[in-house]
Image (cartoon, rainbow, N blue to C red):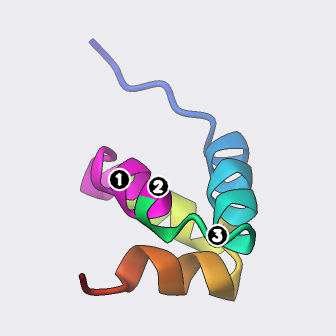
Amino acid sequence: MTESVNCEKLAGVLNRASAQGKHQFCKMLWGNQSESIQSQLLPYLTEQAQDAVKEED
């Protein structure tokens, strides 16, 4: 089965969630994506969202 992910929509969710301080949600959602999807998402993420997904627990 081929992965079909709308990176712009997913990035929008991550950007909104990080702006609302939902960093754990961002990390969970990020962790559920394959490395190829993560690399496609990065250009769409705000700096705040990138910080949220890279935060260490």
Q: Main secondary structure of the magenta part?
A: helix
Up/down of 2 relative to 54, above or below: above
Q: Which residue is mark 3?
A: 18
Q: Marks 2 and 3, how far apart in space?
A: 8 Å
Q: Is residue 50 left or right of residue 54?
A: right
Quadrant of image for the N terminus: top left
> Is residue 20 shown in magenta?
no
Which kind of residue does numbered mark 3 sit on?
A: Ser
- Label 3 crowd bin: few (<14), some (14–19), many (20+), radius 10 Å: many
Q: Which residue is mark 1?
A: 28
The residue located at (71%, 78%) in the rendering is 46
Disc 2 is placed on an element classified as: helix
Q: Earlier in the sequence, mark 3 or mark 1?
A: 3
Residue 38 % position (x, y): 40, 60
Task: Please give the name of the residue rendered at 54% of the width and 60% of the height, measured from the top-left corner.
Answer: 41
Q: Is residue 57 left or right of residue 11?
A: left
Q: Residues within 10 Å of mark 2 (few under 14, many from 20)?
A: some
Q: Which mark is residue 25?
A: 2
Query: Which region is colored magenta?
Result: 25-36
Q: Residues within 10 Å of mark 1 (few under 14, many from 20)?
A: few
Residue 39 position in % (x across, y down): 42, 65
Residue at x 70%, y 64% (from the top left corner) = 15
- Cα separation between marks 3 and 1: 12 Å
Q: Quadrant of the C terminus?
A: bottom left
Query: What element does badge 3 sit on?
Result: helix
Q: Label 2 amino acid?
A: Phe
Query: Does residue 12 appear left or right of residue 14 in this picture?
Result: right
Earlier in the chain: of badge 2 and badge 3, it is: 3
The alpha-carbon separation of the residues under discs 1 and 2 comes to: 5 Å
Circle 1/circle 2 CB separation < 8 Å: yes
- In the image, is residue 32 above or below residue 28? above
